[in-house]
Amino acid sequence: MNASIRPLCAIWNSSIGKKYLVALTGLVLVLFLAGHLTGNLLVFVGQEDFDEYAKFLHTMLHGAGVWIARITLLACLVIHVVATIALTRQNAAASPKYQHEKTIQATRSSRIMIISGLTILAFVVYHLLHFTVRVDSNLAELAKESPYQMVIAGFSSGIVVLFYVIAISLLCSHLSHGVQSIFQTLGLRSKKSAPLISFISKAYALIIWLGFLSIPVAIYFFKFGR
Amino acid sequence: MLNLTLKVWRQKTPQDQGSIETYDAKNIPEEASFLEMLDIVNGRIIETGGEPIHFDHDCREGICGMCSLTINGVPHSKEKGITTCQVHMRKFQEGDTIWIEPFRARAFPVIRDLIVDRSAMDRIIASGGYIDVRTGSAVDANSLPIPKTDADSAFDAAACIGCGACIAACKNSSAMLFTAAKVSHLGHLPQGQPERDKRVLAMVRQMDAEGFGNCTNQYECEAACPKEISVDHIARMNRDFATALVKEQLLS
């Protein structure tokens, strides 16, 4: 085996190594969500500020910044998804079912991680086509004028808002287990810190849920900006 | 006296499909232990010319780790911090239906009925769960200073009796708690330091090779452990493994 990739293989070939990759890429994605939400909430400040922010994202570092972010996030997303699917397949193969199945205390969120995760993945693909690639030519025209108007128009559709609500709710579930899992997998959790870590995880998930849903709810149900 | 219905996993050979059989367990004394209840039922099966229910047991006082069984889907029953042999029938109600199945994991093949082959855990120990040199007999107190918290943690980890309940309770049949307890036990003590990196790498790799699943941080293991061993040891093993892997791959 090539000596340069041997360390990577050693990480990938071990259960804990793959879990480290999931935790570290998960951490990047978790932190991205906070930045993404903060930017999005500018929609409530006003059209000018939001459009200015959108322009900044595309012009920072002479336009390279957005691509550095995109490539980093895409790499993290791919590693996160590929590793979790590999781990989940191993888990399914390792654990025969009981005739009388019982869960002692594991949370529902922790048990549907792969389902919430894959739904979020499907949503991310749709979300990128919707607001980044803009396959809808009307939205693409609007976005050239003002990203703010694109967001308002995008969230004026009931079906879009419905999918958004479902995906963000599953994201909230995913985070409530995922954030605290990062600490355990990286070896940073203990009995003493467990209550605090659990609180941070759930609070973060709730903030993300409230924050991201506030925008479509305000636009669709309360006619914000329309 | 209790009258119960048992739903018991019966499987003649490792290759056999196996299925749940129903047994009436009438007139069971409340002071009987769970295994004594099975003894009573087996006595009656034998009297009618049937094949008794095969199950593992040895000391029957909660220290050997031999008894297994899941009782209503929970290894060693839902009672906290005890093994199957310490479960008493007074914990059940008249007319209850009790599901009794073997510890399930792909790495624990069923030998017969409720008996599974747990030697995968022995192979994990054999891969590094020891100290290579003789460390001598017990030394004078305080001749080898060990902080109290380290001694306590090592002792808590060493309480593992290797029963496999953590694996049976895990949604993924992961052996992380068992392996972590063994890694942590020796890793907390001065005698275990020279081989700390080598040990964690070898034991985790053996654990992976045995076909156990991966930890998803749900802590069902800790909840099922009859010795109430903490998942803190898993966090510590994750940390130890990562540093040992980096050293192995990039340094020496």
Image (cartoon, rainbow, N blue to C red):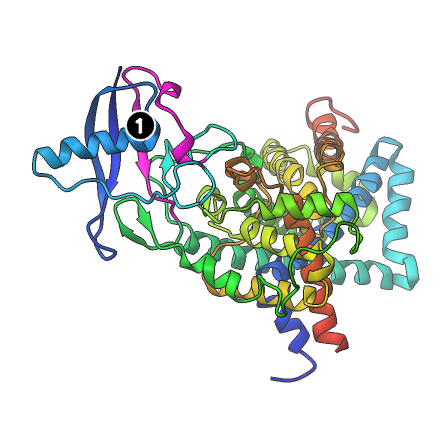
Residue beneath label 1, please?
Answer: B98
Q: How many numbered circles does the render carry?
A: 1
Most foreground residue, A106 or B165: B165
Looking at this view, name the residue that lies furthest to the bottom: A2
Most foreground residue, B183 or A148: B183
Tell me which corner region of the image, top left, top right, bottom left or bottom right, holds residue A166: top right
Task: Report in which chain the residue with disc 1 lies.
Answer: B
Percent x, y of residue B91: 40, 20
Q: Quadrant of the N terminus of chain B?
A: top left
Q: Judge the density around disc 1: few (<14), some (14-19), many (≥20) Cα neighbours within 10 Å.
A: some
Q: Amino acid at mark 1?
A: Ile
Percent x, y of residue B224: 50, 37
Most foreground residue, B68 or A15: B68
Looking at this view, name the residue that lies furthest to the front: B140
The answer to whether A190 is drawn above or below residue B250 in the figure is above
What residue is shown at x 51% (from left), y 65% (from top)? B126
The answer to whether A42 is drawn above or below residue A223 in the figure is below
Task: Say left or right for A207 vs A108.
Answer: right
Extent of the magenta region: B83-104
Looking at this view, name the residue that lies furthest to the left: B49
